[in-house]
Image (cartoon, helix red, strand yellow):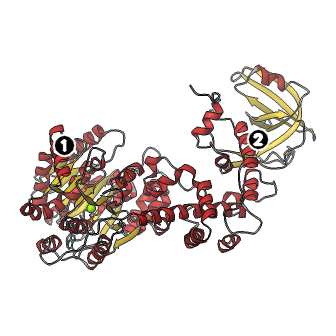
Amino acid sequence: MPLSPALSAPQKALLKLGLGRDIDLALHLPLRYEDETRIVPLRGAREGDTVQIEGTVTVCEVAFRPRRQLVVTLQDDQGDSCVLRFFSFYPSQQKALAVGTRIRARGELKGGFLGWQMVHPVCRPAEGELPQALTPVYPTSASLPQNYLRKAVLGALKRADLSPTLPAAVDQEMGLQPGWDLRRSLGFLHQPTPEVSLAALEDRSHPAWQRLKAEELLAQQLSQLQSKRERAALSAPALRAAAAGSLPEQLLAALPFQLTRAQHRVSEEIARDLGRELPMHRLLQGDVGSGKTIVAALAAAIAIEAGWQCALMAPTEILAQQHFGKLIGWLEPLLAPRGQRVAWLTGSQKKKERAEMLQLVASGEAALVIGTHAVIQEQVQFRNLALAIIDEQHRFGVAQRLALRSKLVDALREPHLLMMTATPIPRTLAMSYYADLDVSTIDELPPGRTPVVTKLVADSRRDEVIQRIRGQLAQGRQVYWVCPLIEESEALDLTNATATHEALGAALPGVMIGLLHSRMPPAEKRAVMALFTSGRMGVLVSTTVIEVGVDVPNASLMVIEHAERFGLSQLHQLRGRVGRGAAASACVLLYFSGEGGRLGETARSRLRAMVETSDGFEIARRDLEIRGPGEFLGARQSGAALLRFADLATDTDLLEAARRLAPVLLDRHRELAERHVARWLGGRQDYLKA
Ligand code: ADP
Ligand code: MG
């Protein structure tokens, strides 16, 4: 039986919003402010302004036309009047607005030939002084009224420990204005005086905002640094790079190509990490098609040669299959003579097969374990896992990344971790969330790629696109046609792809046209792919299954239908399927502008970005601008809004200063630093560490 008294509905709502501690409430800043400090005379007021007026009620009656409403006329001290209308109202309201009462009404002023009006203004009796400060409006939920929240925040502000945690020198280094400490800044932001520039509050350039942003960024940098140091206290098995004739060498010798300089460089960076007793925590980034898979295979080969197991994961089953098909092709023939195997683990596996695989993993017979996040589930017991590789790491949730880090080798050792991404992390993000991460970049594509020309074409010009396909086919080239993504329903995806497949068949007689979608049996998929790869199939119509992994250098044209529905990095990945051979290649983004003939703003900026650049880094930067950092961080799944005040895109100076100062603080003022992190991050530290 709980001994504490039951919580009221607003108290529960507070907890639900993460506002349990006084400090959480103190850091819960207003969305905007309302100015109730002034009374505006109607004479000289402007239409459309939200204002507070004061006067005496001269009329209060219920009218029935055009519909039932309470109509109140308010006359201000200059003798001008304004009609207040309420379409839903209580008898108590009607009473409070009786003729002769003096009230204050706040709302948006509308003009009109009947004179001034306000619909559903907020009214209160005109008694007492006007407030001295702007009235804050907080982000809240339905069960938590503004007034309750305002009082809770003010109470918390008085109680919370807001004593400085940053030495004065730090304030100075970060360019913070003297006098604006945390207490004053928060007090001000919750109740700004009316003469403040609303612009400075809105664009967050006010010294009070600077203080909050700086402290937040420092908290985040400190927390990252702490976890980096904690990690340094753990060790990992040192996987020494190999002697002549070892697995990595055999692998290199068997490849049909030479590594690029960039691939060499990053492979060496990784090998160096693996050779240490410090757990590697490295992100390998490289554009689509830059050749990350072979780098991963080399790392795996080092681990296996040293007598350990390696696990490789992708976010979905299709991705896992496609990403690693090649890798298995390279490694399996080399492992077989050594009596070692590759195990495959996914959620959709039959029980019996899964049990067999788990057995292979536990006994160590499987030197390499590939799959989805099924690879890190609790039941999976490795014999000796020394290296975990995650592809498309940003698509994994935080919880999954944490689970992976719990697969310890033994009490004191954890596996090395290599993460890979084709969505390069913008510099600001790399410096902040990924401060606890070493980054290797493949900044060069394998030779023989040609740049892809990207064109935006309205769907009404579909015929021209088909003409273009004919042209490519006549030159012996091949074409991808990617069908729209319909978020809610895979079944609809399929209907659409089937219809397109038929329509293209009718328009291009005599051409072999294939259809590929995620619900086809694997054998059928393989058969279709084999026909396309061999060059006999001219056009491949597909849902987004081909997003990754498909490699047909003769394909020179990609059409993406309903391109406006795709995310930017997905479009970029898709486009990476063409331009892999010597032929000039193109990508046509077919868009539907909908009823009003206009694309939404974000869709338009995505498509524009695709036309303007094919540089993965630039694409990632714009994606960050368009979508915000959540997507890069996998924060969508965690639901944790990570940075509330600072904006990584614009607060670069503060971020750089915080990054520079964090180690100094942690070394020289450990206690303060720890208090600072606890105050700012509370229970959310784990998320930041993942
Ligand atoms: P991604 O970085 O997108 O995962 P992949 O590893 O799938 O790229 O490589 C894309 C294609 O380039 C594959 O067909 C791969 O075999 C090929 N490739 C990788 N490295 C080289 C290289 N150094 N020279 C030629 N082709 C390469
Ligand atoms: Mg890949």
- Which residue sits at x=21%, y=42%? 519
Q: Position of residue 143 (x, y in %)?
A: 63, 32
Amino acid type for the residue under numbered disc 2? Gly
From what the image shows, is residue 111 above or below residue 175? above
Q: Residues within 10 Å of mark 1 (few under 14, many from 20)?
A: some
Q: Residues within 10 Å of mark 2 (few under 14, many from 20)?
A: few
Residue 33 in view (yes/no): yes
Compute the Cα span from label 1 to label 2.
Answer: 72 Å
Nearer to me, 222 or 132: 222
From what the image shows, is residue 359 above or below residue 162? above
Left or right relative to 123: residue 671: left
Image quadrant where one finds the C terminus: bottom left
Amino acid type for the residue under numbered disc 1? Arg
Question: Where in the image, quadrant-wise, is ligand 2 located?
Answer: bottom left
Residue 549 in view (yes/no): no
Q: Position of residue 592 (x, y in %)?
A: 38, 49
Which secondary structure lies at badge 2? loop
Q: Position of residue 640 (x, y in %)?
A: 51, 49
Left or right relative to 44: residue 300: left
Q: Quadrant of residue 613?
A: bottom left
- Which residue sits at x=17%, y=47%? 359
Find residue 111 and name its label: 2
Return the residue at label 1: 354
